[in-house]
Amino acid sequence: MSLRQVGATIQPTMDDEENDRERDALQIAPASRWKRLSLQELRLVEDSNDMVGHIVARYGVDECRARHDVDALLNGRVLSALSR
């Protein structure tokens, strides 16, 4: 996390706020797409492969189909870098 000092206080930078919003979006979007996955479960997802595994387990869909759906949802974003 990058911080900047303002007077006697330290505040998060705009980049941190932007990353927080992006991380939140990456957690909410799958929850709205796959309703059987709770936000608590999605917070524990480590990366896109882990998410694919959850979708296959919960919905019984083919792994290739789940991978396609996850890749489309992430749209080039890296899940593991934003979920921590």
Image (cartoon, helix red, strand yellow):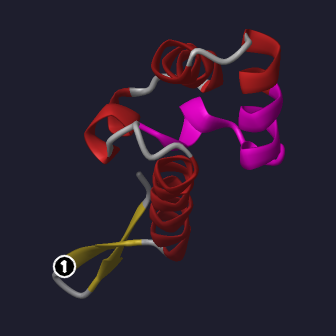
80 magenta-colored: yes
| Position of 61 relative to 14 (above/below) | above
Residue 73 locus on image (x, y percent): 73, 47
Q: Nearer the viewer, residue 82 or 74?
A: 74
Other-residue count near label 1 (Cα within 10 Å), few / some / many at <14 / 14–19 / ≥20: few
| Position of 36 relative to 19 (above/below) | above
Secondary structure under the numbered disc 1 in the rendered image: strand
Residue 47 locus on image (x, y percent): 57, 24
Magenta region, residue range: 68-84
Residue at screen point 46% across, 49% down: 31
Please indicate whether residue 73 sits to the left or right of residue 34 in the image. Answer: right
Q: Quadrant of residue 44?
A: top left
Residue at screen point 54% across, 23% down: 59
Residue 35 locus on image (x, y percent): 44, 46
Q: Quadrant of residue 42?
A: top left
Q: Nearer the viewer, residue 15 or 48?
A: 48
Query: What is the number of callouts on the image?
Result: 1
| Position of 60 relative to 36 (above/below) | above
The single residue placed furthest to the front in the displayed view is 60
Residue at screen point 82% across, 48% down: 75
Amino acid of disc 1: Thr
Residue at screen point 40% across, 38% down: 36
If the image is split into quadrants, where does the C terminus sit?
A: top left
| Position of 47 relative to 23 (above/below) | above
Q: Nearer the viewer, residue 7 or 80?
A: 80
Q: Quadrant of residue 40?
A: top left
60 magenta-colored: no
The single residue placed furthest to the left in the displayed view is 8
Majority SS type along the magenta span: helix
| Residue indicated by mark 1 | 9
